[in-house]
Amino acid sequence: MRFLGNKYVRDEWARHRPLLTASAAELESDVEKKTVRERFLREWAAYSETIGAQIQSAERWEHSVETPMYGRNLKRQYLDVMSDQQIGQLHSLKEEVFETTKKQ
């Protein structure tokens, strides 16, 4: 599962590299690029905080028989703006993750 996560993160940052390396002047002249860049960075910061908190929580489960859960459900507002293709990709990712988890 870690392999899938690492690959996804690398691909996502590579796709957004042009936005991340754009100059301040470029971003000021293109409001849409600036907005997408800010949202991308804000979402990754929130993801980092969520995972950090879940890892700390999991450390408390170390001697428990239960398995800690990672991640969270997507908010409805995000699903509502996704294309059918994006929802299909999420579904494929979910199936791949659960299949990989079953094999372990």
Image (tube, rainbow, N blue to C red):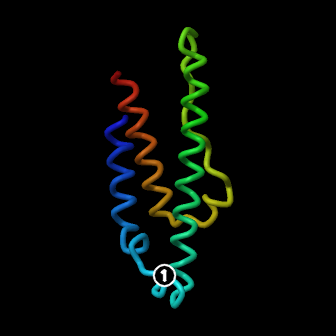
Q: Residue at x 39, y 51 (%)?
A: 9
Q: Nearer the viewer, residue 34 or 4?
A: 34
For the N terminus, the image quarter is: top left
For residue 99, above or below residue 16:
above
Q: Nearer the viewer, residue 95 or 67?
A: 67
Q: Mark 1: which secondary structure?
A: helix
Q: Position of residue 101 (x, y in %)?
A: 40, 28
Q: Residue at x 58, y 32 (%)?
A: 54
Q: Quadrant of residue 78?
A: bottom right
**Which residue is situated farthest in the bottom direction here?**
29
Q: Position of residue 12 (x, y in %)?
A: 39, 59
Q: Residue at x 59, y 44 (%)?
A: 49
Q: Nearer the viewer, residue 22 or 100?
A: 22
Q: How many marks?
A: 1
Q: What residue would you read off at disc 1?
A: 24
Q: Nearer the viewer, residue 1 or 88?
A: 1
Q: Position of residue 79 (x, y in %)?
A: 61, 58
Q: Position of residue 66 (x, y in %)?
A: 57, 14
- Local packing at callout 1 (Cα closer than 10 Å; few below 14, some 14-19, many 20+) is few
**Which residue is situated farthest in the front direction here?**
24
Specify the amino acid type for callout 1. Ala
For residue 73, above or below residue 88:
above
Q: Residue at x 56, y 23 (%)?
A: 58
For the C terminus, the image quarter is: top left
